Image (cartoon, helix red, strand yellow):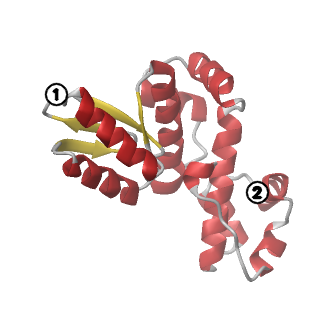
Amino acid sequence: MKFYIKNMVCSRCKMVVKSELEKVGLHPTSVELGEVEVNDEPDKNTVQQLNDNLKLLGFEIIDDRKSRIIEQIKNAVVSLIHYSEESPNLNLSEYLAQQLNYDYGYLSNLFSEVEGSTIEKYFIAQKIEKVKELMMYDELTLSQIANQLGYSSVAYLSSQFKKQTGLTPTFYRSLKQNKRRNIEDL
């Protein structure tokens, strides 16, 4: 049986969800971002207990098709930006259509309808959070960060950064307390 779980965005999330599955007596055969597979067919009480436990930790079992697709879109974008070696400047629409086996027009309309925002805005928000992370480490120049994240120029990165945060990257870097947002809060 497969469970789709909302807000799984990192490897720590996978460990926490796996632990919660085991607490209710389920033994996962696969734990991926947003998806868990178990061999057994759990009863309703076990599923309810699992969902209650997950909600306390900021997760939730998704049981409708639209929500599952939205979560898959988000997970694909997060994986691409934060965990992939692929270049984030590839064609996002082609990438998502390939990853999810749906027409991009359908994915885009569904995402906008449910989230009230576009996939592109979500993608940009993820890229800006990655820029913040890389700037926090203070190992790369802004030019190197722009190149790594597929921006055509530092000016374009700076423009998007300012639109998202209200600050220039240089000013943001100079702040002592770099406030980053959790990926799942975007």
What mark, if any, has residue 157 been given in the picture? 2
Q: Is residue 95 left or right of residue 17?
A: right
The residue at the far front in this view is 45
Q: Which residue is mark 1?
A: 41
Residue 76 in the image: state x and y as whole percent.
48, 40
x 44%, y 45%: residue: 55
- Residue 67 location in percent, x, y? 50, 27
Q: Amino acid at mark 1?
A: Glu
**Residue 61 location in percent, x, y?**
40, 35
Q: Sequence-wise, which precedes: disc 1 or disc 2? A: 1
Decide: is 14 above or below 48: below
User: What amino acid type is highlighted by mark number 2?
Assistant: Leu
Q: In this orientation, which residue lies closer to the viewer: 175 or 28?
A: 28
110 up-or-down from 130: above or below: above
Crowd band around label 2 with a 10 angstrom C-alpha radius: few (<14), some (14–19), many (20+): many
**In front of the other: 145 or 162:** 162
